[in-house]
Image (cartoon, grey):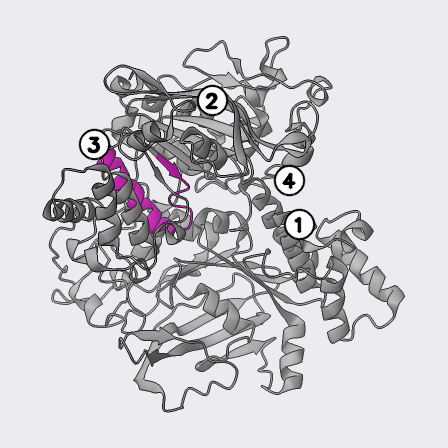
């Protein structure tokens, strides 16, 4: 997504400012804390990736931001400020239903995880597209809505004669394209995409991502892209936030996260994806499995799976600390609090100027952090 | 179409444990009365497809003359998009579906279709399914799942030896302490643990062949490698022949010794895993590679082709990939390519590798521009197979 990578957009003004957001499922002592103390900042025109495994709270976070969280989900704290183009900020958590109704879809839209379930199977996609316009653009004529729906379909690469089709008549990739067209119907500033390509084939996934990049270049919306596929996120996102067990554990620019992760969980995730380059080596992934949110380990939730765990990790929860290296790098790890030098694999130098560093020929696979860890660096 | 298909040649000598020769699987298409659109139904054993309800003999060409060999102590990966026939191949190899034609050889012999022959076959060839959330019975504990195959195949008559067998099975898939896991129910296990139980169940009958149909695609990223490493251990420690079906070409490169790439029911390329992924010879493999996520790639990837897979009811004539292929030539629309050897043990079913095409046959097919210029993937090495 080349547009998002240019420095001009990175310096964009803040669009969505999430502070200390907490969301629970259920109430009382049995409540499951699905999102704890999440801070996120989405800038205008930026692609922000949110990575994490199932159960890490990434979808809950997205639904909490848009106030779409269904019972028994409850937002228990924090603030979500949306900075509209006209300069004033709206607190989404305090907004009333009517205010939300105006903002949703026209300013912030969501592409849901499974297009199969998000589209109504008994209504043609043309009607589902015009429905949005009818509800949000009261002045539009019927013919105008029809024309706009056709335009939207064409925009995502589906011929307009498909307007009369029902979801079951479309392939998975086409359904997902319809979902994207719907999300863009009112030209929102922010599109939240919750695993938009997970159920699709690699080739279809790539085609949709290509289209998305093109649309972003043209329409200039910001994207919060949620996925478990960190290797994909590194390619398409400007900056990435990694979630584990309901908390953000690391924030970095995409290239910096890939070349120089600072949290052991990010490092583990990165070494969970077999590479397409270089000699084949034995990889270990991350031992153990993700924790049960009802019985989180004390201290850092990752410590039972962490090979670097200190005594302190078992008792004290590490805060998400600003690291002393600029570009908004944050990590929630006691190894990075500056009291002692971090292990070599977690202290690799950040490549200069983000993406520009990767513009040359791809470095040999040995530059991958976990491989460097195996060899002794000279 | 006998010249079709590439045999996944093992880099080892001797008879492969399981070999499929020229396997074809067609599913009859049932015409729905109201719309006339095809409705698919899989036929059970016996394949009573000859009944009159099958309209005008139209069929889904799910597998077309596929040959594949699974040697001992080797992982053979089958890579392809959904609908390419990978799972049908696994089901045919597991004898859950009877092939329309072709033969399955276990240790070089064909086993009879009788009940006893089938039992002897399943005793040695076991299937692990994709979704561990639906492949285990929620009302039975782990012990039941593991004891059942042992009882059915008469391997654990006495209670003491049954317990011993279950414990050792759980230990083999690293579910320890075994006695604790044996009494758990599927809902008490994580996805990765469930898939390990499914693998243990397949191992219970001491099979020679394990067919794993997308065994990790439903699992969390951080635990996938653990399972791939378990499969790798089974290959090395126990010499099991493994078929690893996946759409993730990077994991196939990581785990497999040999990769066979399937497209629209046919094997289009096969060879040593690293060679197939690093120097893909078939344009479809190049497309798969260019589409795979790759953080080490500089800049956004250029897709090596566009469009979707063809209808398998009426597949395109000639090479089934030619409507999508950026290098398509006149001959591609006309005749299906045979397997051409591009390197020792590495074959591709693509006319670009034919040596003796005349100019008319080699004329590129000119298509209206589809938005993107047709070009080889930037990351794929040039193998000198430009259209002549």
Above or below B184: residue A64: above
Q: Is residue A16 visible?
A: yes
The residue where tag 1 is placed is B193
Label located before the other in sequence (4 or 2): 2
The answer to the question of whether label 2 and label 3 lie on touching residues, with beta carbons closer than 8 A, is no
**Mark 3–mark 4 distance (CA, rounded to whole Å):** 41 Å
- Quadrant (top left/top right/bottom left/bottom right) for the N terminus of chain A: top left
Q: Nearer the viewer, residue B150 or B16?
A: B150
What is the number of the mark on residue A251? 2
Chain of the residue under label 3: A
- Tag 3, which secondary structure? helix
The residue where tag 4 is placed is A289
Q: Residue at x 35, y 38 (%)?
A: A110
The answer to the question of whether label 4 and label 2 lie on touching residues, with beta carbons closer than 8 A, is no
The residue where tag 3 is placed is A219
- Tag 1, which secondary structure? helix
**Mark 4–mark 1 distance (CA, rounded to whole Å):** 9 Å
* Mark in front: 2 vs 3: 3
**Mark 3–mark 1 distance (CA, rounded to whole Å):** 45 Å
- Tag 2, which secondary structure? strand
Chain of the residue under label 1: B
Q: Residue at x 48, y 49 (%)?
A: B253
Which span of residues is magenta-colored? A192-218
Quarter of image, res A125: bottom left
> Percent position (x, y) of residue B121?
63, 77
- Quadrant (top left/top right/bottom left/bottom right) for the C terminus of chain A: top right
User: Same chain for marks 4 and 2?
Assistant: yes
Q: Nearer the viewer, residue A134 or A105?
A: A134
The answer to the question of whether label 4 and label 1 lie on touching residues, with beta carbons closer than 8 A, is yes
> Percent position (x, y) of residue A303?
67, 27
């Amino acid at each position: 997504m080349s547009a998002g990578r240019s420095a001009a957009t990175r310096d964009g003004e803040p669009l969505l400012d999430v502070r200390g957001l907490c969301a629970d499922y259920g109430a009382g002592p049995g409540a499951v804390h699905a999102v704890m103390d999440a801070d996120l900042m989405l800038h205008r025109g930026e692609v922000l990736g949110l990575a994490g495994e199932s159960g890490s709270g990434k979808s809950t976070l997205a639904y909490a931001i848009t106030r779409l969280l269904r019972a028994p989900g409850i937002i228990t704290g924090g603030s979500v400020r949306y900075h509209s183009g006209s300069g004033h900020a709206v607190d989404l958590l305090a907004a009333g239903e009517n205010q939300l109704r105006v903002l949703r879809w026209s300013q912030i839209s969501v592409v849901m995880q499974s297009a199969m379930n998000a589209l109504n199977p008994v209504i043609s996609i043309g009607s589902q597209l015009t429905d949005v316009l009818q509800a949000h653009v009261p002045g539009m004529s019927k013919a105008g809505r029809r024309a706009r729906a056709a335009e939207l379909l064409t925009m995502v690469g589906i011929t307009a004669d498909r307007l009369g089709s029902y979801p079951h008549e479309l392939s998975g990739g086409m359904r997902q394209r319809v979902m994207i067209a719907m999300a863009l119907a009112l030209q929102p500033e922010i599109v939240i995409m919750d695993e938009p390509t997970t159920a699709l084939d690699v080739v279809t996934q790539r085609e949709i991502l290509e289209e998305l990049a093109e649309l972003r270049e043209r329409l200039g919306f910001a994207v919060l892209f949620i996925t478990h596929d960190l290797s994909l996120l590194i390619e398409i996102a400007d900056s990435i936030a990694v979630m584990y067990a309901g908390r953000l554990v690391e924030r970095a620019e995409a290239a910096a996260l890939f070349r120089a992760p600072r949290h052991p969980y990010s490092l583990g995730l990165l070494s969970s994806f077999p590479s397409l380059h270089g000699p084949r080596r034995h990889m270990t992934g991350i031992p153990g499995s993700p924790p049960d949110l009802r019985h989180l380990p004390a201290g850092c939730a990752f410590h039972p799976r962490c090979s670097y765990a200190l005594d302190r990790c078992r008792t004290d929860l590490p805060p998400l600390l600003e690291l002393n290296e600029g570009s908004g790098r944050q990590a929630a790890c006691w190894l990075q609090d500056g009291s002692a030098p971090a292990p070599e694999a977690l202290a690799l130098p950040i490549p200069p100027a983000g993406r520009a560093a990767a513009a040359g020929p791809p470095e040999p696979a040995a530059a991958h952090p976990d491989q460097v860890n195996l060899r002794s660096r000279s | 179409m006998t010249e079709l298909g590439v045999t996944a040649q093992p880099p080892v000598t001797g008879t492969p444990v399981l070999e499929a020769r020229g396997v074809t699987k067609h599913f009859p298409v049932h015409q729905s009365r109201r719309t006339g659109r095809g409705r698919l139904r899989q036929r059970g054993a016996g394949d009573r497809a000859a009944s009159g309800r099958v309209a005008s003999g139209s069929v889904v060409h799910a597998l077309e003359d596929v040959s594949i060999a699974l040697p001992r102590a080797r992982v053979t990966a089958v890579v392809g998009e959904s609908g390419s026939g990978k799972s049908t191949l696994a089901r045919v190899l597991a004898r859950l579906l009877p092939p329309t034609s072709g033969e399955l050889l276990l240790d070089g012999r064909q086993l009879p279709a009788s009940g006893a022959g089938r039992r002897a076959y399943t005793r040695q060839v076991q299937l692990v399914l994709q979704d561990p959330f639906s492949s285990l019975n929620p009302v039975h504990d782990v012990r039941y799942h593991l004891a059942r195959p042992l009882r059915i195949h008469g391997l654990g008559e006495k209670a003491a030896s049954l317990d011993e067998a279950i414990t050792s099975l759980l230990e083999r898939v690293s579910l320890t302490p075994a006695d604790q896991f044996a009494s758990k129910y599927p809902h008490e296990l994580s996805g990765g643990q469930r898939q390990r139980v499914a693998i243990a169940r397949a191992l219970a009958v001491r099979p020679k062949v394990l067919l794993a149909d997308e065994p990790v695609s439903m699992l969390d990223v951080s635990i996938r490698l653990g399972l791939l490493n378990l499969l790798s251990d089974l290959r090395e420690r126990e010499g099991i022949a493994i078929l690893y079906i996946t759409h993730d070409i990077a994991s196939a490169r990581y785990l497999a010794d040999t990769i066979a790439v399937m497209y629209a029911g046919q094997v289009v390329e096969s060879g040593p895993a690293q060679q197939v992924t690093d120097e893909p010879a078939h344009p479809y493999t190049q497309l798969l590679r260019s589409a795979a996520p790759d953080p080490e790639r500089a800049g956004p990837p250029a897709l090596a082709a566009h469009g979707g897979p063809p209808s398998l009811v009426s597949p395109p004539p000639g090479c089934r990939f030619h409507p999508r292929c950026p290098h398509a030539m006149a001959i591609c629309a006309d005749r299906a390519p045979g397997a051409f050897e591009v390197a020792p043990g590495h074959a591709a079913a693509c006319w670009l590798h034919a040596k003796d095409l005349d100019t008319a046959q080699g004329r590129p097919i000119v298509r209206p521009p589809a938005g993107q210029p047709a070009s080889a993937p930037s990351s794929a090495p040039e193998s000198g197979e430009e259209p002549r």
